[in-house]
Image (cartoon, grey):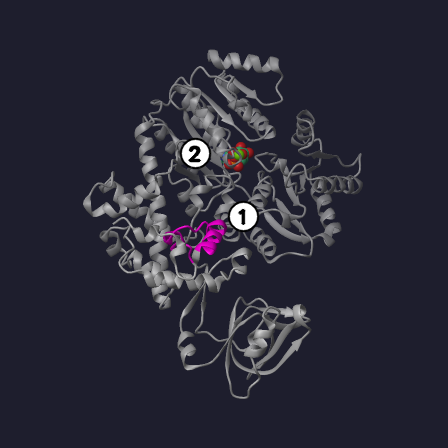
Amino acid sequence: MSSHFLNSPVEYIKGVGPSKAELLKKELHIFKYSDLLSFYPFRYVDRTKFYKVKEINADLPFVQLRGKITHTKMIGEKRSQRFTAIFADETGTIELVWFQGAKWMGEKIKPHVTNEYIVFGKPGVFNGHFNISHPEIDLVTEENTTFASVLQAVYNSTDKLRTRGLDTKGISRIQKVLVSLIKNNIPETLSNIIRERFQMISREEALKQIHCPKSPELLKKAEFRLKFEELFFIQLKLLKQKGLREKTFRGFVFSKVGDYFNTFYNHHLPFQLTNAQKRVIKEIRLDMGSGRQMNRLLQGDVGSGKTMAALMNILICLDNGFQACLMAPTEILANQHFETISKLLKPLNINVGLLTGSKKVKERRVIHEQLQNGEMQVLIGTHALLEDVVQFKNIGLVVIDEQHRFGVAQRAKMWNKNTLAPHMLIMSATPIPRTLAMTLYGDLDVSVIDELPPGRKPIQTIHRFDSHRDRVFGFIKEQIAKGRQIYIVYPLIKESETMDYKDLMDGYESITRAFPLPQYNVSIVHGQMKADAKEYEMQRFVKGDTNIMVATTVIEVGVDVPNASLMIIESAERFGLSQLHQLRGRVGRGAEQSYCILMTSHKLSSDGKLRMETMCRTNDGFEIADVDLKLRGPGDMAGTMQSGVLDLNIADLAKDSQILHAARNMAIELLSEDPNLEKPENSNIAYQFALTNNSRSDWSRIS
Ligand code: ADP
Ligand code: MG
């Protein structure tokens, strides 16, 4: 049934009217009944629970109390008037205060020996005492003691809406009116088969219960139903896109493993591959031989050896007569890849080139030529690879390192560099929780290196306050005396922030004072330096000519100096977890015991504390990513990546991984039985799918 009901404008709802409707549109994008119904509460207050006054502290969200009013007082005049009441139960007293509507409250609330009130509000602290400002307060009567037995929905609102009476209570009121109008007018979106399988309540019942829950059990069922539905349709979309891509986008067939691969594997591998590396190399190889274009994400923690896995597949690409390229997000990293890879491939006589922004025009021209005539087999570089002048004779594989730094549109450019789109291997060292990967990349194939090369000693991580700097300097000296090298990293959130820059330079100065020439050598690298100066300083450190590298996060990505055994992160509280983990991954690459010291001020938020504790507790990137997801939510973590996919309305990727798995498996099962959603029993699903997917979405082609 098409739903007139759901499409009705909200101004028809009693208590809304044209001007409030206008405000709801502007502030919350609520136009129709369906929009209001899917504006879910973000929390529920259990009105069955009563706190005692002595249990109150300022960390509690909302509390409900029951007791008497012993004193009241009106203070000040007119506009600056406020009304206070002392509320008491058998455990103590607390002040209630009203700044707005003081006069009215003064008339309503009177001290009384027997009358009992129910008070509901958020405790705060004022002058060293707890109080509650603007609580809801109701006289206990028979009627509202029954009312007190339900879960009350709490809605987000905005300042503008609040001034028009649409605070959480106001929104709750109109939701109740709307819910009372629901009567066989909400179309079902899932099939009976699915509903029976998971014993789901109907969509209609779920919408009623989510706004006006009759019991905690029914609320749970409503939440499950709506979360499942939300995740199910996202998965359905991703899986359909993936199916489409597999059908539509033919790829080059790399049918053989040839001399390059075999010679390298048998004679020039510098170490034994880990089992995880072997496994992903095979997954990638099979994918590139399948006849369809590969779009694969290679995930692996920092130091897990993704480069070697990619390189082995680059060799397979060459064995099949194609060229390959590797794109990195920074020059430093591109240079480093170039050094390592050209050294490794030297015995095979493979022509490897480097193309970055700082290459001279002349050099570029030579590279462009060699790419077009096929002389250059492997190209390594930065964004410079994307330029239209860069054309290949026959590019077959594009490897992108640290993909989260590249925009989707940038990557798309690589698709057009050959007659068929080349195979894409996207490497990420930012472990994403599986749930997030499934939602973000449900349309990508994923390979995971979940094993570190043997012999690595886990990095020891320590949290120190700034006041212990002297002891930290002492530790630096010990490490240098052992021949080790040290990174000291300063936050530079935006390269232009002058304050950060000053911190860095001040830091550099104090380091050079504490570690003077000629005994010590200190390098510095930051984003405002010219590329060749940066490169020079970097190389001094890589070669071991300097003991300490003072840097901003430019070193975060990829840099590999196995002799560096100590990472000091200044103002660590200003970094996010994934960035801290990335930075820490710069050490622990050699055989020595490595350390990471997180320096912070004494003032730490609770989030900040949790981040430090997490870093000290574990080296596991996936575990860290999970905490990160819980702290920041998926939107922030994903950055600019396909953010549309993450506009989740009710499901929470950090908490609902089980529902996500169930929804995904159900979507897979459904599509395998009814790929075009044509069967009559799936008509609800087909209808809803068409409804929600009429907007164009072609990103799946790219990432
Ligand atoms: P990441 O996955 O962070 O990009 P790299 O590819 O830079 O990691 O590898 C990290 C280090 O581990 C490099 O010095 C590399 O040579 C080394 N390495 C990679 N694979 C192995 C292995 N199987 N055994 C020993 N060392 C390895
Ligand atoms: Mg790497």
Residue 309, disc: none
* 35 drawn magenta: yes
Q: In x, y percent, where is residue 205?
A: 31, 60
Give 689 or 480, whichever is nearer the viewer. 689
Q: In x, y percent, where is residue 45?
A: 46, 67
- The answer to whether residue 354 is left or right of residue 522 is left
Give neighbour class at mark 1: few <14, some 14-19, many 20+ (Cα, 10 Å): some
Highlighted magenta segment, given as a residue range:
18-40
Q: In x, y percent, where is residue 662?
A: 33, 51
Question: In the rendered image of this protein, does residue 386 appear above or below residue 362?
Answer: below
Question: In the rendered image of this protein, does residue 293 appear above or below residue 617?
Answer: above
Question: What's under tag 2, amino acid-wise?
Answer: Ser
Residue that sits furthest to the left in the current view = 680
**Residue 20 seen in the figure:** yes
* 570 drawn magenta: no
Residue 142 image-quadrant placement = bottom left
Can you identify the residue that label 2 sits on? 703
Magenta stretch mostly in which secondary structure? helix
Residue that sits furthest to the front in the current view = 18
Query: How far separated are the C-alphas under marks 2 and 1?
Result: 28 Å
Question: What's under tag 1, amino acid-wise?
Answer: Asn
The residue sitting at 52% across, 21% down in the picture is: 387
The residue sitting at 43% across, 34% down in the picture is: 703
**Residue 220 seen in the figure:** no
Indicate the secondary structure of the residue bearing disc 1: loop
Residue 619, disc: 1
The residue sitting at 51% across, 21% down in the picture is: 379
Question: In the rendered image of this protein, does residue 100 appear above or below residue 486?
Answer: below
Give 678 or 268, whichever is nearer the viewer. 678
